[in-house]
Image: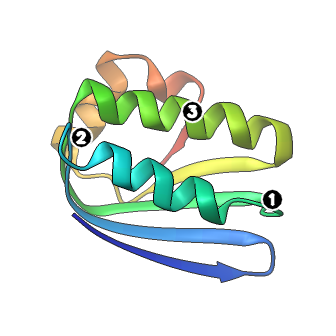
Amino acid sequence: MEINLRKLNGSLYVKAEGKLDIDSAAEFGTTIKDALDDMNELVLDFAGITYIASIGLRVLLEFYQQMSKQGSIKIINVQEPVLNVLKMTGFDKFLSIS
């Protein structure tokens, strides 16, 4: 998985490519968590995410819990297969997804 981070005016923009699965979820989570200090917005660009496993959903839930305390989180450019998983699991009910 390739992960690119950019900080701008209190926002952390993350562009990731690949599969968010057992092989990549730990790195994805750690990389982003380490950069979230003092951020009031987390924007995850999922244009390059082609698959999300349950462990990836767990990482998103952890981001949601952290950002609920310090700001907001949104996921943009979600591909249809990943969007279907987010909807089936109810993540679209509490995450801002576009």
User: Which secondary structure, mark 2?
Assistant: helix
Q: Earlier in the sequence, mark 1 or mark 2?
A: 1
Task: From the image, tell me which residue sits under label 2.
Answer: 82
Q: Residue at 60% across / 26% down in the picture?
A: 94
Image spot of residue 30 (x, y percent):
48, 52
CA gap, disc 1 to disc 2?
A: 25 Å
Total of numbered circles in the picture? 3
Q: Residues within 10 Å of mark 2 (few under 14, many from 20)?
A: some
Mark 1 touching mark 2, by CB under 8 A? no
The quarter of the image holding the N terminus is bottom left
Depth order, front residue of 77/69 = 69
Q: Amino acid at mark 1?
A: Asn
Q: Is 22 situated left or right of 86 in this image?
A: left
Residue 27: name its quadrant.
Answer: bottom left
Q: Amino acid at mark 2?
A: Val
Q: Is 68 situated left or right of 33 in this image?
A: right
Q: Residues within 10 Å of mark 3 (few under 14, many from 20)?
A: some
Image spot of residue 38 (x, y percent):
83, 63
Q: Earlier in the sequence, mark 1 or mark 3?
A: 1
How is this picture coloured?
rainbow
Q: Residue at 31% across / 44% down in the picture?
A: 25
Q: Residue at 16% across / 40% down in the picture?
A: 81
Task: From the image, tell me which residue sits under label 3.
Answer: 62
